Amino acid sequence: MTAFFTPERKAGLRLVLWWLAVLYAFFFICHPFLIGCGCSDVGPEHTCGIVQYYASIGGIAWAVLLPLGMYLFRRRENMLIFLLILVFITLTCTLFLLAAPSLGLGAGDLLSAGVAEFVITLIFTLPLLPYIGFLPLFGAGASAETLLPWLFVYCLAAAGFGVYLYRRRNE
């Protein structure tokens, strides 16, 4: 029986199970956007409890799966670099959105200030979609301003953990 589970098969099984867990988390995260619950409300501000529950489960699962994936695949250089790129993209977008009000986006543009700010904010918000499930956990009046500082600290810690694993792998 132990001959069936060689180290290569165990690593392959871990990879498949991790990706299945990631897909499961993303289906939970996208539930408010794709399926809803049959009522007319859609989107991240959905008021039905079950939709917020699913989004919160997906956000927590993704927040746990990302560092877990870094740890599980610390010996696979390409996978570790891929996960680090995901963390650094999220970290960069979070930093930009935290600094965006002080940059004065849209002031003096040829385009309408509202449209330019909306497009720029949309582009930098898309990588933060996996974490939208944390909004209900922060309370009823939670907004992006509540989520962004917490997300910055989380991404900074995850990036530090990933860089530590990468450096340790190369020693």
Image: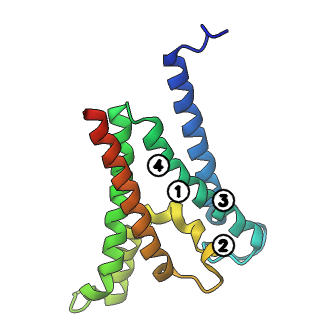
| Disc 4 to disc 2: CB gap under 8 Å | no
Q: CA distance from mark 4 to mark 3?
A: 16 Å
**Mark seen at residue 67:** 4
Q: Nearer the viewer, mark 4 or mark 2?
A: 4
**Mark seen at residue 42:** 2
In the shown orientation, is residue 97 left or right of residue 41? left
Location of the C terminus by quadrant is: top left
Whichever of callouts 3 and 2 sits on the residue coming sooner in the sequence is 2
Whichever of callouts 4 and 2 sits on the residue coming sooner in the sequence is 2
Q: What is the secondary structure assignment of the residue under circle 1? A: helix
Whichever of callouts 1 and 3 sits on the residue coming sooner in the sequence is 3
| Disc 3 to disc 2: CB gap under 8 Å | no
Q: Position of residue 19 (x, y in %)?
A: 54, 39
Q: Which residue is mark 1?
A: 63
Q: Nearer the viewer, mark 3 or mark 2?
A: 3
Classed neighbour count for the residue bearing mark 2: other residues with Cα under 10 Å, few (<14), some (14–19), many (≥20): some
Q: Pick whichever, 64 or 171, lies toward us.
A: 171
Query: What is the three-letter code of the residue carrying label 2?
Result: Val
In the shown orientation, is residue 114 left or right of residue 43? left
Q: Is residue 36 visible?
A: no
Q: Nearer the viewer, mark 1 or mark 2?
A: 1
| Disc 4 to disc 3: CB gap under 8 Å | no
Q: Residue at x 44, y 63 (%)?
A: 154
Does residue 12 sit above or below 146 in this rendering? above
